C-alpha cells in the first residue's frame, strides 16, 4: 500500500512563499492523480488542488487560484505544492492524497492520505 509523507511546512510571513512536498513509497504513485487538501482549526477539510497522473492538468480552488501551483515528478515519486502570496487564512495542516483509481485526470475520491505538514502564516 502506498505511503505518503508531506514535508516542508513551517512558519512564513504574510506575502511570503513556501514549497511543500509529498513523497510516495511502497506502492503505485505515477499512475494516479494526486490532490492537496488543507484543514484549519475549527474548519472542514478543504480541497486545494489536484494534478492528473501525467502532470499535464492541474485544478485549484478559487481561494488559492493564481497563488498556488502543483507539480509532480513521477521519476522521483513526488508531488509539490508551491505557495506564493501567502495569507494568514492559508494557515492550516496541508495533506496530500492519492486518487482511488489509476489514470485519473481530476479525482473525485481519495483513498490514501499523508500525515500532513503544518503551514503557519503570520501577519
Image (cartoon, rainbow, N blue to C red):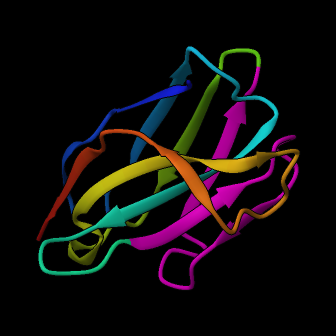
User: What residue do we see at 88% from left, 45% from top?
Assistant: 103
Quadrant into which the N terminus falls: top right
Q: Position of residue 109 (x, y in %)?
A: 63, 63
Horizontal relation, residue 30 to residue 15: left or right: right
**Residue 49 located within the stretch drawn in magenta:** yes
**Residue 111 located within the stretch drawn in magenta:** no
Residue 15, picture quadrant:
bottom left
Q: Position of residue 45 (x, y in %)?
A: 35, 72
Q: Position of residue 25 (x, y in %)?
A: 55, 16
User: What residue do we see at 72% from left, 62% from top?
Assistant: 107
Asked whether 34 or 120 is in front, the reply is 34
**In this picture, is 9 found above or below 16?**
above
Asked whether 87 or 92 is in front, the reply is 92
Horizontal relation, residue 24 to residue 52: left or right: left
User: What residue do we see at 11% from left, 71% from top?
Assistant: 123
User: What residue do we see at 48% from left, 83% from top?
Assistant: 63
Q: Which residues are magenta?
A: 46-74
Residue 40 visible: yes
Q: Position of residue 12 (x, y in %)?
A: 20, 51
Residue 17 visible: no
Horizontal relation, residue 9 to residue 123: left or right: right
Asked whether 27 or 9 is in front, the reply is 27
Asked whether 41 or 58 is in front, the reply is 41
Amino acid at each position: 500500500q502506498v505511503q505518503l509523507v508531506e514535508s516542508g511546512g513551517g512558519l512564513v510571513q504574510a506575502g511570503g512563499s513556501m514549497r511543500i512536498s509529498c513523497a510516495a513509497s511502497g506502492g503505485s504513485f505515477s499512475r494516479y492523480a494526486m490532490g492537496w487538501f488543507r484543514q484549519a482549526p475549527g474548519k472542514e477539510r478543504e480541497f486545494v488542488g489536484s494534478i492528473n497522473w501525467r502532470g499535464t492538468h492541474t485544478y485549484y480552488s478559487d481561494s488559492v487560484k493564481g497563488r498556488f501551483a502543483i507539480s509532480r515528478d513521477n521519476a522521483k515519486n513526488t508531488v509539490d505544492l508551491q505557495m506564493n502570496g501567502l495569507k494568514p487564512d492559508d494557515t492550516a495542516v496541508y495533506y496530500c492524497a492519492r486518487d482511488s483509481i489509476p489514470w485519473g485526470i481530476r479525482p473525485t475520491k481519495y483513498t490514501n492520505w499523508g500525515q500532513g505538514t503544518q503551514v503557519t502564516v503570520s501577519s
